[in-house]
Amino acid sequence: MLPRTYLSAVTLAWRAAPFLIGAYLLVSVVEAALPVATVWLVRVIVNGLVSRAPLPTLLTPATLLAAAGLLSAFTPQITRLLRADSQRAVEYFTVERLYQRVGNLVGLARFEDPRFLDRLGLAKGIGGDSCGDAVYGSLGVARGVLTITGLLSSLFLLSPVLTAAVLLSGLPAFAGEYLISRQRANTFWKTSSAQRRELFYSGLLASVDAAKEIRILGIGAYLRAKMLDERRLADAARRRVDRRETLVQTTLGTLAAVVAAAAIIWSVARAAGGRLSVGDVSMLIGAIAAFQGAVGSVALQFGLTNQSLLLFQHYLSILNEPRDLPEPARPRPVPPLRDAIEFRDVWFRYSEQQRWILRGVNLRIPRGTAVGLVGLNGEGKSTLVKLLCRFYDPSRGAILWDGIDLRHFSAENLRARIGAVFQDCVRYELTVGENIGLGDLDRAADRTRVEAAAVRAGAHDFVMALPQRYDTLLSRTFPGDDETGQNSGVDLSGGMWQRIALARVFLRGRRDLMILDEAASGLDAVAEHEINAKIRSQREGVTSVIVSHRLGTVRDADLIVYIADGVVAEKGTHGDLVRLGGRYAEAFTVQAAGYQPASYQAASCQEADYQEGLAEARPPDAKPLDAGPTNAKPTNAEPFNARPTNAEPLDAEPLDARPTNAEPLDAEPLDARPTNAEPLDAGPTNARPTDGGPTDGGPTDAGPLDAPAPLVGGHGRQRVRHP
Ligand SMILES: Nc1ncnc2c1ncn2[C@@H]1O[C@H](COP(=O)(O)OP(=O)(O)OP(=O)(O)O)[C@@H](O)[C@H]1O
């Protein structure tokens, strides 16, 4: 495993900086040879001096020794420079490769996998550097081994036994460093989660976005404590390794000192007995000291190299991460949508351990239609959108684009046919122009188009009021490019950011499929109406999917789909669904009631009390007091189920918002309606008897229920009849 990892590291480093690494190798060999040469030259000179050799004989080794000293003075500086330069080149290359790989993960699943994120965190932090560290570490080891070999050969000439003893004394250093390096790499991996959590807390504590909430809730100290807990956890693990390392190093140091002392005593004894020359003794002492120094540093390098390789494996595992979405070997071109997109028995869950989110969705989205996706929180609307963009593939079933399974397309090509705005649109801390330009990089430099997109999104006016207009930096965390600080960034409101996101999608131009996932949620009511009209014009002839909790946003959709329990629970036009009197109708009523004045809402509550009171007072077999015709819904039904099935549709705006003589409400949005408009298709509110038809199944002539009129009637009535 490790040899393969090593080979990958070397290949990668060589591809990143071949010349710098070549030069480093050359200088390193010279540097490695210098200590050996020095020891030999010293021996020659000392022996020459002792034997009173003539000066010319000593001049050559003396000159060489001086040259070696000179070289030793500057080779380390050269190797350091070459190493720093090439290491930077290798890091640049590895970072580029890493983010290329991350960018090639076309789905979202990996980004929601904590193990992957831990690994990515390591790969980003030290995994990339570890490539250079492993390569240079190994070169350092090789150089050290050369030096050690030279020193040992010198010793071998004096005493093979001593050489073996010295060599053996060095081996535990390698074993110790090897074990420590494994523990260090393991600690990096084990503490990566804690480190990421610590980063998360520290990010929150320093984040401008979180500052408001943290202060208002007074949770700064709590978050700080959590951050420090994570740090303590990681520090405890690091401390354990540090202690083990100290123990190992101390033991090895003691062993080395004992061996050196024994060798010195032995050589002095031999020299005293005339069996070693003075030069031999001085060489031996020098060689042992140099050997032990070399062994210490080589063992350390060896350990670090091993640790780097172990960490580099995390980096490699990200590079070798299998595709998150299977891409077809030969992807089919994505043709312009001609007929329809179809969900065919689509089942989906985020992982096998989790519950099913979609349980057999069948849905046809014909080309050119606008489909509104509605439903309660967490029912899977955004999940459907994610499948449509191929961020995930269905667990079962298929989504077809003109009959072709999306899995046959490359995700990138498919997305080129899609324009989308999400509720959690990204706030890029770039200039306004760049923020919009990201919608289509080919058009980003075209200021006229960028401005036109901003105009369509209703953003142009506020952009023109910004200090640098389209060149204003949208950031509170980065300084502007102006050194005076005058041109520092500004921030926008949530709704303004949403308009910038809309401008982005408008710049993208007409795509086959337009997705608006709560795209107008941050907008004020006037802006929403205005933007909706613009979106309507933008989506003419374009297939669009609109997810919204504001039912006014989707009411003019060609098809409204109510998602519940993982399936399409209801579908039809607004009118159909209101007539159906199901969950959509109920949701619409609840929202409509929200627009009523307080007196109306109070009346609604009182009406409920009143009905409850009646139900309690009534004998079980009694006919409902305000029972409507036989086709009326039962009294215990939900508000809309309680309406007569032959009642007019509920496609009205909130009643009190409309003039009594208003036009049918499914015509234009409320604020566009003239005050003298014709009556609502729901029937004029004054058509309803003021003494109130029953709310829970009023008579058929009681007037249409598409407006909450019965509750108004009920209000009057209950004041008379409520005990
Ligand atoms: N990445 C994920 N991993 C696991 N579960 C997820 C993930 N994303 C969403 N869910 C779960 O899937 C369910 C559906 O979520 P989804 O966001 O699709 O709902 P929604 O209908 O769009 O909700 P809302 O109206 O609140 O936006 C929820 O229970 C949610 O917790």
Image (spheres, helix red, strand yellow):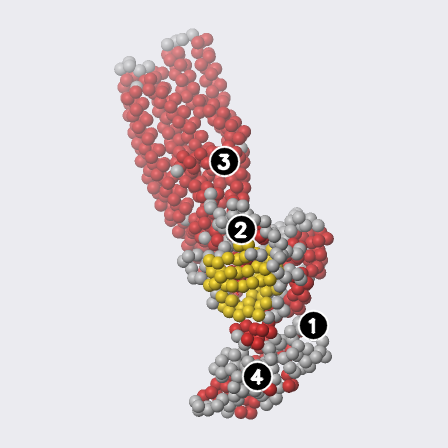
Q: Position of residue 114 (x, y in %)?
A: 44, 52
Residue wearing tag 3: 12
Contact between labelled residues 3 and 4, with CB atoms less than 8 Å apart:
no
Q: Which residue is mark 2?
A: 408
Residue at x 52% of width, y 41% of height: 97
Q: Residue at x 49, y 89 (%)?
A: 624
Residue at 35%, 22% in the rendered image: 152
Instruction: Indicate the amino acid at tag 4.
Output: Leu
Label 3 element class: helix
Secondary structure at badge 4 equals: helix
Earlier in the chain: of badge 2 and badge 4, it is 2
Badge nearest the viewer, 2 or 4: 2
Q: Amino acid at mark 2?
A: His
Residue 622 versus residue 282 in the image, above or below: below
Badge 2 local density, few (<14 within 10 Å), some, or many (20+)?
Answer: some
Residue plotted at (39% across, 38% down): 1
Q: Amino acid at mark 1?
A: Ala
Q: Earlier in the sequence, mark 1 or mark 4?
A: 1
Separation of marks 2 and 3 at Cα, in angstroms? 33 Å
Viewer-proximal residue, 333 or 619? 333
Of circles 4 and 3, the one toward us is 4
Judged left or right of residue 432, residue 322 is left
Q: Is residue 575 above or below residue 697?
A: above
Q: Is residue 527 visible?
A: no
- Whole-percent x and y of residue 53? 40, 8
